[in-house]
Image: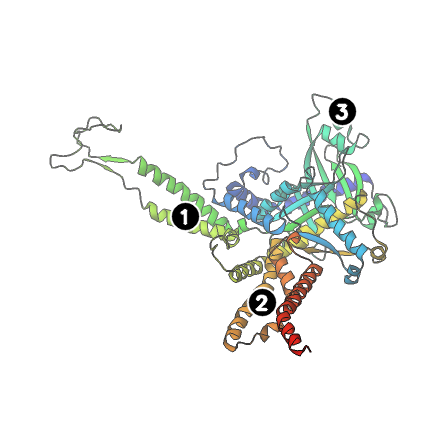
Amino acid sequence: MSKLSDDEIADEIIRRHEKAINERGTLDSHCEEIAERILPNYAGSFVNRGMTRIEGQKRTETMADATGGLALGRFASAMESMLTPRNSTWHRAIPSNDDLLKDRRVRLWFENLTRALFKYRYAPKANFASQKRADYLALGAFGTGCLYVDRLVDRVEKGLRYKYIHLGEIFFMENHQGIVDTAYRKFELTARQALQQFGESKLPEEIVRHAKDTNKCDQKYWFIHCVQPRSDAEGYDPERKDERGFPFTDYYVSLTRKKLVQNGGHTTFPYAISRYDVAPGEIYGRSPAMSALPSLKVLNEQKKTVLKQGHRAVDPVLLAHDDGVLDTFSMKPGAVNFGGVSAEGRALVQTLPVGNLSLAKEMMEAERAVINDFFLVTLFQILVDTPQMTATEVLERAREKGALLSPTMGRQQSESLGPMIEREIDLLAMQGLLEPMPDALREAAGEFSIEYDSPLSRAQKAEEAAGLFRTVDWMAGVINITQNPEPLDHINWDVAVPEILDIQAVPERWKRSMDEVLQMRQGRAQAAQEQQMVDAAPALASVAKGVAP
């Protein structure tokens, strides 16, 4: 099949992008409703796509109650703390072949790889933490998060750079296995930024001219970024060393002249796209906010009603008889209104009833509880509500949390974190920031897997620890009755205790190695033997004295 020309590629990308926009109209309207109520900074970014947004514009007119926004913020914070906590090593790379773990050089290489990943991911210029939080906010609000992972473009340093991509500007497709492998992103660049990114040779002449004009260099232009599997029609050849040898395209199209301004390639998919939940027959995610939208709408209207009731309660409507007795009526503090009561002492001015404020507040609290449940706020507070618990109770709660959150964690690991880590390793290797592979690992084609060690992963493992504690409690009762400690012999404590320490997130530096433990046991045994000899010395001396001639 003949290779497509640059103009044909640009036309095809624009056509498919427009088709994707038309197919997503219903979802965009849905997301716009949500943004107006819980994430107002994004209001207008779906229905007004393609229009330049006004900096600093107020977007909170529709938002009467902040419960949804607060719940979303807590959801994002909880997801970060449970999946990607900044202060811990929440994953490590290991070889896919367990036999390679016997090779010390392979183990050291993977330790250094894990250390390098966290070093460059959390470097100040990488901007990972802030962009990942925005990704979690989008996941809770719109059901789909997208993080673009790229190499750091810097004159001094090498490394990684992360950018959150708003759902309003990204469109994607899945392959036959349900894996996202195609993305179209429409975005703006100033003329100066476009010249910095693409150079002068392929940009439309108008953009180049404006980039060099100080009065017009900040004028914005629209571009489309397309990443998709490179097909035979695009000249894919894995043996080639140019862009045609990459499995994914890296096309940039300028909409100013419908011109292809960059034709590159990627060895790994650069967009880490994840969904919170996916409905049958759909490819975009469904979010907690979508499930909570009815309650969000009801609560918003309830808040407006309560505000009116509250206003009437503190500044009531007055009812007065139209008999001309009161010529004037003062609402000032300490004022005396003559004629306000009849000769019998009956008030001639009364307030209009404002309704049952207590009932309204109860109804609002009921809606808030539903919203918090959808955003998992109640679940994440599972240990906070009852702090006075035994170790067994803590493990039971952690086990319950792990079971309830495992579907969320599994999708995030497979769709977001896994592809992101694969992309990071690829970029670091391309920049020469990783050590050479040991020969044994190179012979195994460098295959590796990721083992997650986040708080949520440990919560899933809490089932094993909780089972051990339940068993020990039962054994304690049996031993107390029978006065026979032999049931404890069935438990291999040297295996169980280190794993429980891991589940409980005990820092590695606090733990002793098995060699140190064995040395301590040997020392105690030797000390006990010496003490036994000391205790036995008087008796031995007496015996020796008795048998002396």
Say left or right for 301 vs 175: left
Q: Mark 3: which amino acid?
A: Arg
In the rendering, which numbered label is found on residue 468? 2
Question: To which quarter of the image does residue 524 belong?
Answer: bottom right
Q: Mark 2: which amino acid?
A: Leu
Residue count near mark 2 (Cα–Cα under 10 Å), binned few <14, some 14–19, many ≥20: some
Residue 140 at least partly seen:
yes
Say left or right for 460 vs 322: right
| Discs 3/1, front | 1
Q: Secondary structure at mark 3?
A: helix
Say left or right for 386 vs 491: left
Q: Mark 1: which amino acid?
A: Met
Question: Which is more toward the observer, 534 or 354?
Answer: 534
Question: Which is more toward the observer, 278 or 544?
Answer: 544
- Cα distance in 3D space between marks 2 and 1: 43 Å
Image position, residue 515 (x, y; %): 71, 60
**How is the rendered protein coloured?**
rainbow
Image position, residue 36 (x, y; %): 52, 41
Image position, residue 421 (x, y; %): 72, 49
Q: Are marks 3 and 1 in contact (CB under 8 Å)?
A: no
